[in-house]
Image (spheres, grey):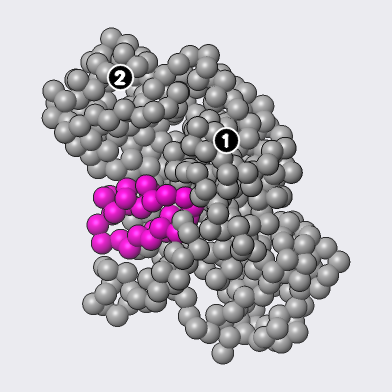
Amino acid sequence: MIAFTFPGQGSQRPGMGEAWADLESWELVSEASAYAGADLSALLLTADADELVSTRNAQLATFVLSLVVLDAIERTGLEPARVAGHSLGEYSALVASGALSFEDGVRLVNERGTAMLAAAEERAGSMAAVLGLDDDKVEAACDAVDGDVWVANYNAPGQVVIAGDAAAIEAAGEAAKGLGAKRVMSFPVGGAFHTPFMAPARDRLTKALAGVEWRSPEIPVHANVDGLTHDDPAEWSDLLAAQLTSPVRWRQILHEFDDAGVNTVIEVGPGSVLTGMAKRTLKGTRTVSVSSPGDLDGLLEALASAPPAQADTGQKDGEHLFATERLVVSPGAGVFTPEPGLGPGTAIATGHLLGHVGDQDVRSAFGGSLMGWLAVEGERVATSEPIAWLRTP
């Protein structure tokens, strides 16, 4: 069983889009630029570190490139059983699940980054990682301080992030060392994210979320605020608003993956921070990071073998790629509408009408069994973007 994870702010780096610019998936960048009213290709190709460190730029660049990478992975025919994203990455996960449209995702991320930057300017804050100390002891260190400091991220065993007022963070760090922490490492950020310091951003984002049309997720999405999946699309506006002032419970999400039977965790987007967290938390689970086109071949090679925990059992549970799988791709750009009555297991003949993209027919070039849709009804797809996944005889 495969889970996709999506990185948050901090994974961006100068020139991170260069390797992807010649792939078909890159067309999403120009589309996103129109939605955001900004040249996102420049952010991904030529922006320097100072420009990318801005909260709004960092979030837009990371979100859009994560979706470019996702599109490239989907073109291989691979799809996950579960998804989750760390902080900003939750928006990428919601787009991947079909709960949020790409257009709304871009607009929300743009507004979120702007709102968080304004909140940080209104009340300065900072963040630091506490390493080598249990969660409850980090909480105790924060509670022992006479100042504003809270846990912001429960990332992995022995890796907890605290945030708040700089002086209070320093005091909490000393208290944590007294309780056995191996190290306290400050982050070069301008805001105390995922704490009450972000309340003004939450209020502003709530207004933007009210204008979003949510759909039921096609793939279960684990929420940052509680680690759980939420099938009711009406819940996601409140969850995303709460996320700004609540700690990210990433460690809990990883344990939820494990409880659900996930044996492969794939990080989709720039960097490999989440891969490291998964390795630290889930022993025996296969982890793969896809941040460059060259990683796609490595991903397929990794999936050709059983995950570590299954290597000696011969079991073939969960998601796998087979040489007999084929993709039906879009004949053009437009809104996808599937034919009624088609679903997993439907027998498909060569030339079978699967649906329409705008006024163009989507027909299968081969026969087989329909395994699932890679585009949801009403989704805007690009030329050659995967529509359906078939397994041929």
The residue carrying pointer 2 sits among few (fewer than 14), some (14 to 19) or many (20 or more) residues within 10 Å by Cα, namely: many
Image point (37%, 71%), residue name: 302
In the image, is residue 389 above or below residue 137? below
| Separation (CA) of disc 1 from disc 2 | 26 Å
In the image, is residue 320 above or below residue 180? below
Magenta range is 265-290
Residue 199 in the image, given as x and y percentages of width and height: 52, 20
Viewer-proximal residue, 201 or 301? 301
In the image, is residue 26 above or below residue 369? above
Q: Residue furthest bottom?
A: 393
Check the picture and name the quadrant holding the N terminus: bottom left
Image point (42%, 19%), residue name: 125
Residue 12, numbered label = none
Image position of 148 (left or right of 182) = right
Image point (49%, 52%), residue name: 269
Q: Quadrant of residue 165?
A: top left
Q: Residue furthest top?
A: 146
Q: Which residue is mark 1?
A: 57
Check the picture and name the quadrant holding the C terminus: bottom right
Front label number (1 vs 2):
1
Image point (71%, 87%), residue name: 350
Tell me the amino acid under the disc marked 1: Asn
Tell me the amino acid under the disc marked 2: Ile
Residue 169, numbered label = 2
Residue 272 in the image, given as x and y percentages of width and height: 38, 51
Residue 166 in the image, given as x and y percentages of width and height: 35, 16
